[in-house]
Image (cartoon, coloured by chain):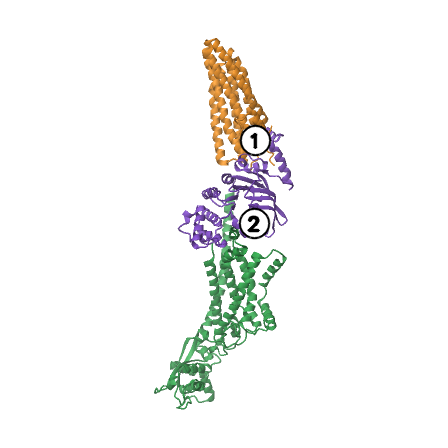
Chain colours: A orange, B purple, C green
Amino acid sequence: MNNETPLGGHISKRFDNELEDIRNKVLTMGGLVETQLNNGILALMESDSAIAQQVSSEDYKINAMEVEIDSQCVEILARRQPAASDLRLIVAIIKTITDLERIGDQAEKLGRFELELIDEGSTSTQYAKLEHLGKLVSKMLGNALNSFARLDDAVALKTIKKNKKVNDEYEALMRQLITLMMEDPRTIKNALRVSWCARALERVGDHAINICEYVLFLKHGKDVRHIAYKEVKKQLSF
Amino acid sequence: MSTNTTATLSQSFRAKPNSMQEDITNDATSESSEHSQHITIGENILENAKFTTRNVNVYYGEKQAIFDVSLDIDHNEVIALIGPSGCGKSTYLRTLNRMNDTISNCRVTGDFLLDNEDIYSKKMDPVLLRARVGMVFQKPNPFPKSIYDNVAYGPRLHGLARTNSELDEIVITSLEKAGLFKEVKDRLNEPGTGLSGGQQQRLCIARTIAVSPEVILMDEPASALDPIATAIIEELIDELRENFTIAIVTHSMQQAARVSQRTAYFHLGKIIEVGETSQIFTNPRHQLTENYITGKFG
Amino acid sequence: MNNTDIVKHGLKKRYAKEKRFQWYGRLAVLTGFVFLTLLLLDIIIKAMPAFQSTQILLDIPLDRETLELSTDATINKDTLSAINYDGLIKKSLSQLYPQVSKRNDRKQLYKLVSSGAEFSLREYIMKNPELISSNSEIPVLSIWLKADDDIDTFYKLQTKISRVSDRQVEFIDSLIQQQRIRTSFNTTFFTASDSREPEQAGIKGALLGSFWTLLVTLLISLPVGIGAAVYLEEFAPQNKITDFIEININNLAAVPSIVFGLLGLSVFINFFGMPRSVPLVGGLVLSLMTLPTIIISSRAAIKSVPPSIKEAALGIGASHMQTVFHHVLPLAMPGILTGTIIGMAQALGETAPLLMIGMVAFIVDVPGGVVDSATVLPVQIYLWSDSPERAFTALTAATILVLLAFLAIMNTLAIFLRKHFERRW
């Protein structure tokens, strides 16, 4: 019986190593993306142009990693013809890195908007509201990456559940911004920027959810996308 | 970081009390150690199946080769039997047309119903059965006769053709169905052993379908062939599905994945899991199946 | 010193060893070849004289007076066979050497011609009775008649032998001068049967005896052998009895052949009351002897048929017997035939068991069937090699050559059959 690592235990040791290597790279990439996002949010909160500059210029690293992992996955598909859990792992990784790369893009966007906002001379006080959303999303991403690293379906499921909170928060923020804009049309320009930031954060949340769904697919072999949370829970017999 | 995560990963994989997989895994461990009551995972029982086998046990002398296997084969489906060497898949296949009758110390118990007829009953003649359940073997084994005589052998044996022209027709249609006619139509009188490996195997398939069997058993039909010949045979199997029910034993999992609709995984003489091929190859329910398919230590 | 050097160091020694071994092999082959060649050469040289026979030209007067026929007597079979041909030959010889008068000399003179010459003369005249009836002016028949075996041997070998007296040597010298003596191809060797007189002895009887014996052997051992082999290999249950039978068949192949002869004597002749010295009994005994060979080789041939072919036939729905007869036997046939022919060749060369059942008798008649008394080639060799007359040495060697030729032909046939019918799969 296989009580080795779930990725390991292949008769081909090299296959084990390849899978381990690829998974480590995904985790590294995840860490990078997480840092970028947190820095983006930090820059937003602190109006720190240096950090914002750093965020918007570091994105290429994530893109490079995506390309590298992608090509490794293709190589494994071609050479190993993985099946069952191996196949699901590779598919999940290919999808996960796409989402990670998108998250990286969103973080970069945050940095860029912040630079624009600083140029405009606006202060970040009105973005305090973003802070909560940012924390929430950042935590979600962290959890998603954790669930991927540990193949922890419980965490993944919990994270998926949080999506509603993010959406609610986003809706509330948007409503606030609209009120603000109606009260004082001069703020429209900045409010729009803030709303874009909020939008970016909301997208990050969606991507994090996707990653969690891939984890569930990897672990249970069931595609749980576009299914109501309760249904998912039932299908996975939680 | 990597080693650390790996360790936690494996732990998390095991510590999963609610998961269905865990229960199965435990079952399998206890069963493979002692040959007790065995439950096959998946859809091994069908309604209105072409072939129904229940509680099949096969013994070679004192040694038991197959333990309590129950498996149904549906009409016009290709079912792939996979598993490591010596797992009993070939033995099981051979019980389906009583080819193991020729092995003197082989004993078979269990129910075998072909269209609800017991194939091991006194009333069932093995010769008749083999006309209904044909077999294609691992090594292409054409008779050292002409291509025509190879295909005509079965029909002649069973008296299926009354006239020579009828026989000609059977031979030609069989060769056509086996996708060989175009290649050999000008040399029907040349020896079948002069063909290439893939052509020989198709000749053997033509020879088998010449007696219009209902079920065709294939015992690793492409294992001795190159990839191109294999692809042609696989394509042929897919076409034959229209008219025949096919059970195929294969060592190549990719082949099983490509040609079959359902797959049964044999392990140490038992069927561990039966299911849709797509399910077996993306999400096997049993840890042993998973290990075999992904190439892990079983 | 690295590995390459170590290997290099030992290399010369290794090659030398290899070369030495090759030379040993060549030497062994050469030795065998030399012995075989010597043996064959010896036999051929000894056999050569047997294919030639010496003849003497005699003028036989055929007038009715000499023939002691009255002028009005009709010439028919009876009158012709009543003629004293021996007297005619003697008279003719006397006419050749009118100066010989001493009784002893005359005797020696008459001994120049074979004692069988009168029979060939009679045969010739019976065939051509018009020679007598014709009214030709000189009714003299010039005919080549066989010389006596001693004269024959002396003339062919040109060496003095004790049985030819000085007087006879003189006669021969004068015959040579008159060109009345010659050698010609010895047809008698192939057309006559055994005889006490070497110049009249031939192998036809033994040849036909061998033929009938082998025919009986083949007819019995081939079907029985194949049947037994097929049954044992394909149908027999795997149990102790089968094992026991198998072991015994293998043992039978090693039993000395004379034991089979004893068995034949006690069973076929004493118990069943079959006649002695006949090819039927000989064939039966030789069948017993060849059966194990045929069964073992047939089983090997059947076993070597790939099981995939059997499976293919069974898989299509052929019954076990159909599988055997449609596929296994045809594919095994070359092997079976090879084994059979080798068994037959063995039987052809067998002497010992046939001695036991009386096929060693002196039989002058050519056997016309399986129940006529007969002898076989190897027994004939055995018989002649025992005879005192010098000319029999040559006959023995010649018969050995014939036997060897037949063995070679049979073995070639076996190789040919195997090559021709062997199928690749």
How far from the left and from the top, in percent, is residue C247?
60, 60
| Percent position of residue C235, x then y | 57, 57
Q: Is residue A79 above or below residue B187?
A: above
In the picture shown, does residue C174 fall above or below B96? below
C133 relative to A2 in the view: left or right? left
Q: Quadrant of the N terminus of chain A?
A: top right
Image quarter for residue B68? top right
- The residue depicted at 57 percent of the width and 69 percent of the height is C353
Q: Depth check: C379 or C169 in front?
A: C379
Q: Chain of mark 2?
A: B
Q: Which residue is mark 2?
A: B98
Q: Chain of mark 1?
A: A
Question: Looking at the image, which residue is at 55% across and 19% down?
Answer: A165
> Would you name the residue on which mark 1 appears?
A220
Looking at the rendered structure, the secondary structure element under dot 2 is: loop
How many numbered discs, if any?
A: 2
